[in-house]
């Protein structure tokens, strides 16, 4: 590489614009903003959102709205609170490809807050989103080992840098200051897998948004940072790498190839950790094909690669939040109810006797022969259900609906959106917001989006 990677990243951030971006990439970004708005509204009354809001100055005159309501606060606080609210229920999108991560929840909140503060258009927001996504992909692909294997939460680490890149693009920073923004963000990136299943995990997302806004503003104001903060021997990529095996020789393809088109966001149709989704789809299919119920099951075996299982850290969950990261719970829930919805993610449901009994009969098998560096599904992943009558049912696990290889349809996206916002918006207002987000390039400003009135939201 003839020039420092940090400098090349800054140059891409400075030059990228809506006019340069392929139409298919814009469509994916629109879906990202739409899905984010739904889960942000759904999560706006969760404990972590309320806690963070209690520490901010909230009124009617701030720079940006909180969860599209009339409540306003400073852009930095809005990015933090809205980011955490959007990730609080772990129902937001996934993507990036090089590792499992939640891209939109660390891009959209910061972009929306700053775009509202600066009165910028939907086109500017879409360009900023794709800028952040591309920078994230460019950096993540340089390390073959997914960082969460070491204990890093990529949504928080890479996400902070991607958010800074997005906001730097939105604010129109030149190449030098854009490079400084990502370098400043690199010194603030952090988040550990050990905090999955607690309020700190969604705080990771909120904090990454806060870092993005703060870093871009500091760089714009003249704050300096290492010009090689990404590639330095003691810089971000090497410091955070699980094995220290980082490719720093391959020239960036930013703006030449579009990472989002190869590894775009996937959209969750089940409100649990994405590590569960393929198994959920498999159990739903087996149940539909063979007509059994939870009462018919003697034992369940779920075999997945070790990377696929790494986020499923709760083997005996006691709360709805913990249950999101439990494969045992996911299998029991679907076997008993034939669905995976928000209604099951309550403490009371998790503590039901039949749920706990079936969870105890779920056996997880980490297949050491599977590719230890692949997070996106293993060729030998399988689900086996043994019924009490002796029947053995087996299924190879495939990608779930909503995965980039099985794209979500507009009807499915609308179904999820309307379900998420039904307690906050009338059907007509929900449809107006959905349609506005689905044609975001025509939006004059964030202020044109419908206002969400105060209402109790399911948590």
Image (cartoon, rainbow, N blue to C red):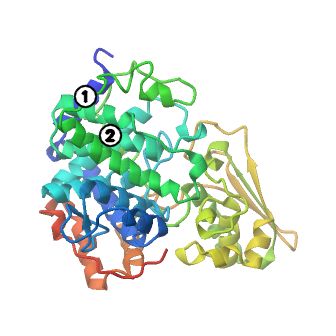
Residue 86 as seen in the image, left or right of residue 429: right
Q: Quadrant of residue 51?
A: bottom left
Residue that sits furthest to the top in the current view: 2
Quarter of the picture holding the N terminus? top left
Q: Position of residue 356 (x, y in %)?
A: 76, 71
Q: Nearer the viewer, residue 65 or 339?
A: 65
Number of the label disc, if any, that sits on residue 134: 2
Is residue 410 visible in the rendered image? The answer is yes
Q: How crowded is mark 1: few (under 14 residues within 10 Å), some or many (20 or more)?
A: some
Residue at image x 53%, y 37%? 147
Q: Quadrant of residue 58?
A: bottom left
1 or 2: tag closer to the N-terminus: 2
Q: Marks 1 and 2: which is nearer the front?
A: 1
The residue carrying mark 1 is 224
Residue at image x 35%, y 50%? 209
Residue at image x 69%, y 72%? 335
Residue 149 as seen in the image, left or right of residue 47: right
Q: Position of residue 169 (x, y in %)?
A: 21, 42
- Image label count: 2
Residue 217 as seen in the image, left or right of residue 82: left
Identify the secondary structure beneath mark 1. loop
Q: Nearer the viewer, residue 291 or 137?
A: 137
Marks 1/2: CA–CA distance: 24 Å
Q: Is residue 283 above or below residue 162?
A: below
Is residue 289 visible in the rendered image? The answer is no
Q: Residues within 10 Å of mark 2 (few under 14, many from 20)?
A: many
Q: Nearer the viewer, residue 149 or 221?
A: 221
Circles 1, 2 touching at the beta carbon (< 8 Å): no
Residue at image x 18%, y 60%? 116
Q: Position of residue 131 (x, y in %)?
A: 27, 42
Q: Position of residue 91 (x, y in %)?
A: 47, 63
Residue 170 as seen in the image, left or right of residue 227: left
């Amino acid at each position: 590489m003839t020039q420092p990677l940090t400098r090349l990243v800054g140059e891409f951030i400075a030059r990228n614009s809506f006019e340069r971006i392929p139409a298919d990439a814009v469509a994916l970004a629109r879906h990202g903003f739409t899905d984010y708005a739904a889960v942000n509204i759904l999560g706006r009354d969760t404990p972590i959102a309320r806690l963070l809001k209690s520490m901010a100055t909230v009124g009617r005159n701030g720079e940006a709205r909180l969860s599209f309501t009339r409540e306003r606060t400073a852009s930095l606080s809005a990015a933090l609170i809205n980011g955490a609210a959007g990730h609080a229920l772990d129902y937001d999108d996934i993507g990036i490809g090089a590792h499992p991560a939640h891209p939109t929840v660390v891009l959209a909140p910061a972009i929306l807050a700053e775009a509202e503060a600066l009165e910028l258009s939907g086109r500017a927001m879409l360009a900023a989103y794709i800028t952040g996504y591309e920078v994230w992909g460019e950096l993540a692909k340089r390390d073959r080992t997914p960082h969460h294997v070491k204990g890093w939460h990529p949504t928080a680490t890479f996400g902070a840098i991607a958010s800074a890149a997005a906001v730097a693009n939105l604010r129109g920073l030149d190449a030098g200051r854009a490079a400084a923004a990502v370098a400043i963000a690199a010194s603030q990136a952090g988040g550990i897998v050990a905090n999955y299943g607690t309020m700190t995990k969604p705080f990771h997302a909120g904090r990454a948004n806060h870092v993005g806004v703060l870093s871009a503003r500091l760089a714009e104001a003249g704050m300096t940072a290492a010009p090689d903060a990404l590639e330095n021997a003691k810089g971000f990529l090497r410091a955070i790498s699980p094995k220290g095996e980082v490719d720093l020789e391959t020239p960036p393809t930013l703006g030449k190839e579009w990472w989002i088109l190869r590894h775009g966001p996937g959209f969750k149709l089940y409100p649990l950790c994405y590590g569960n989704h393929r198994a959920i789809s498999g159990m739903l299919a087996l149940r539909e094909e063979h007509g059994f119920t939870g009462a018919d099951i003697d034992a369940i075996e779920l075999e997945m690669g070790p990377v696929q299982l790494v986020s499923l850290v709760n083997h005996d969950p006691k709360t709805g939040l913990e249950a999101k990261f439990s494969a045992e719970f996911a299998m029991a829930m679907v076997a008993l109810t034939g669905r995976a919805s928000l209604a099951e993610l309550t403490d009371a449901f998790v503590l039901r006797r039949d749920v706990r009994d079936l969870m105890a009969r779920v056996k997880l098998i980490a297949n050491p022969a599977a590719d230890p560096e692949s997070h996106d599904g293993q060729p030998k992943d399988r689900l086996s259900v043994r019924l009490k009558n002796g029947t053995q049912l087996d299924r190879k696990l495939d990608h779930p609906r909503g995965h980039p290889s099985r794209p979500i349809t507009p009807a499915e996206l609308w179904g999820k959106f309307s379900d998420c916002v039904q307690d906050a918006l009338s059907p007509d207002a929900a449809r107006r917001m959905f349609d506005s987000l689905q044609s975001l390039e025509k939006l004059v400003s964030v202020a044109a989006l419908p206002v969400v009135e105060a209402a109790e939201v399911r948590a």
